[in-house]
Image (cartoon, coloured by chain):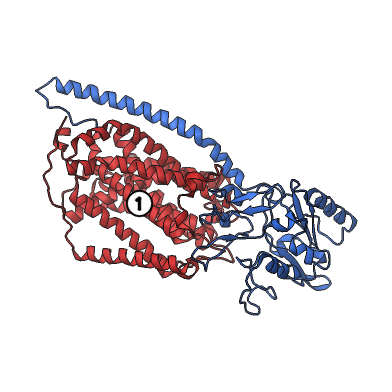
Amino acid sequence: MTDSSVSMGMLIDTTKCMGCRGCQVACKQWNGLKAERTTFFGGPGYQNPPALSANTFTLITFTEIEAKDGLRWIFTKRGCMHCKDPVCAAVCPVGALQKKPNGAVAYDPDKCMGCRYCMLACPWSVPSYEWQSPSPFVRKCTLCDDRQKNGKAPACVSACPTGALQFGRREELLAQARARIAQNPDRYVEHIYGEKEAGGTGVMYLAAVPFSELGFPTVAPHSMAVYADQVMKVIPWWVMGLGAFLTGVYALFSRRKKIAAGLAAEGPQAKQQGGER
Amino acid sequence: MTTYTTTRTGWTFPLTLPRVVMLLLAAAAFGTLAWRFYAGLGASTNLRDNFPWGLWIGLDILTGVALAAGGFTMAFYIEVIGRERFHQFLRPAVLTSLVGYILVTMGVLGDVGLPWRIYHPIYLWNPRSFMLEVAWCVILYTTVLFVEFLPTPLERLGLDRLLHMVRKVMPVFIVLGIVLSTLHQSSLGSLFLVMGHRLHPLWWSPILPVNFLLTAICVGFAMVVFESVLSGWLLKHPLDGKLLGDLTRPLPWVLLVALAVRLGDLVVRGSLSAATEGSLQSYSFLVEVSIGLALPALLLFSRSWRETPGRLFTIATMVVIGVVLNRVNVSMIGMFTETSSYIPAWSEWVVSVGLVALGVLAIVFISENMPVRNEYHHADYK
């Protein structure tokens, strides 16, 4: 289960989640995260706390859906998606965020300087900041890297009483998700969220309704880092090309100027010229 | 070796009322920054998890760098392709850029969460990150600007031997400075390439770096005009309308290219219709493109507008406003979503305004005490 070279992932079957928030509590306990002072109905419906934060790495969202058979309450578990090609890691100037072979997108607080680019780059706005601290760090789910090293599943998965959360090799979870949709086409929409989103994510979801109704953003089937990568490729050529061009043009115009200056100097006794500038 | 006579001896800085006000503003900025370091960003700014970049990134850094584009624009125009008639505009442009970049560095120090680690990008490299490129460009180009500006204090101090040496290596720094500037100006746009999920389609584009570079060149010319006319008025020295007008000859064309590229890209991506959706973003876009690009381009084709300093000043101001608005749109207004918007806290304004005041004071002090507008050897030079 915990071969550290195998990319692990999580399958979240929202049709099995009953919204107990045991995972949320287990996550807080394992990571030693502080409680948050919240107000009742401070977020969408019964969702509490209202959003992910530096003290909340995972959050059960509450969505009310009007279905044919009446009102339906759907719970999803949000947090870091542990992308295959995480854009947060692609944009971090100092390499503080990195994709580990075991699938976790890990954060090294010793490298971070606090530019917060990762927070804006993440399509799910997952990385959170310790805004109240004078020496703040980025915080987010670690896929319980530390538990994995000791042969244990992430705290949230261990706490889940209904089997809505499953931890395992990403490829196996994906096969299982496909099988579940095939066996119960009435129970699920035909979409494994995270299979293709952002080029594939370690955390994947199954749901009974379209994911857009559950507040999931529509994310392109490739990492947004591709646009930056394309431009980055041009840069060495730009530097060499423009450098050569400018040097050439500069030399040409300087030569012209020198010739002109030489002609002028042949006239009346000219004092020494004031240099090139 | 030529000798340059030092005519002035003392350093002066008469404290007029506006200068006292600016000094107070600058002091307020540093006081507020001290509080920000003590209390943290959460208490001292309106930045939140759903809006992690605000005024300091949008105004102090993105806009600050753009408005410092005069240095490389003039270096190319005057030094590289030898438009010697405009030589008098070079030093003020380099000075503004140098001061601008120093202010940008101060803005960065205020904005990042752990500023005492600001040196990390020097040895911790993620070569895939545009933020790394931005960091390196700031470091290198600020150094280049320092060297480019060096002849001015050296002339003032009468250090002829050193001055001669600096002049010898200057061409290398001129070329390096232009290459670095094009990289830096464009890479600030490239930062937003990964934010297609968030940035409004009127601004997000795969060619954001091109848009940033083109508008930087436009505002490079505009800032030189803006400052020349302003200092002419304030210091009551005569303005050569013809010379200023001639300086801006390339500007309408660059503005039109920037406009065409911008609109063409929006048409190709089918996003132009968003300009009429009636949202805050659509209005902001329309103002930006019309006031900042289209109108000044058209007016610049009129000789009477171009060669009347007052009118040219109006045009330059439009271009400056357009570019400021563009950077504000990309970093803030275009980043508003249904669930997150942002209005800067008073403390953020105090820092931004105070840093600008500090910059103006620095430029005024250096201009009054060093041969910025009149090189000592200028008569020789011609």
**Chain B drawn in what color?**
red
**Residue B130, percent across and down?**
52, 45
Residue A218: which quarter of the image? bottom right
Residue plotted at (45% across, 57% down): B115
Between residues B48 and B186, which one lies in front from this camera angle? Answer: B48
Between residues B30 and A32, which one lies in front from this camera angle? Answer: A32
Residue plotted at (45% across, 41% down): B183
Residue plotted at (73% across, 54% down): A149
Q: Which chain is blue?
A: A
Between residues B235 and B183, which one lies in front from this camera angle? Answer: B183
**Residue A189, percent across and down?**
81, 58
Quarter of the image that includes the C terminus of chain B: top left
Residue plotted at (35% across, 51% down): B102
Residue B374: which quarter of the image? top left
Q: Is residue B158 above or below residue B118?
A: above
Q: Residue furthest front?
A: A150
Q: Residue furthest left?
A: A268
Residue type beneath disc 1: Ile
Q: Residue furthest right?
A: A183
Circle 1: element type? helix
**Residue B79, percent across and down?**
29, 34
Chain label for disc 1:
B
Q: Is residue B108 visible?
A: yes
Left or right of residue B218: residue A214: right
Number of numbered callouts drawn: 1
Between residues B181 and B292, which one lies in front from this camera angle? Answer: B181
Q: Is residue B263 visible?
A: no
Left or right of residue A38: residue B118: left
Q: Is residue B81 above or below residue B272?
A: above
**Residue A209, percent across and down?**
78, 63
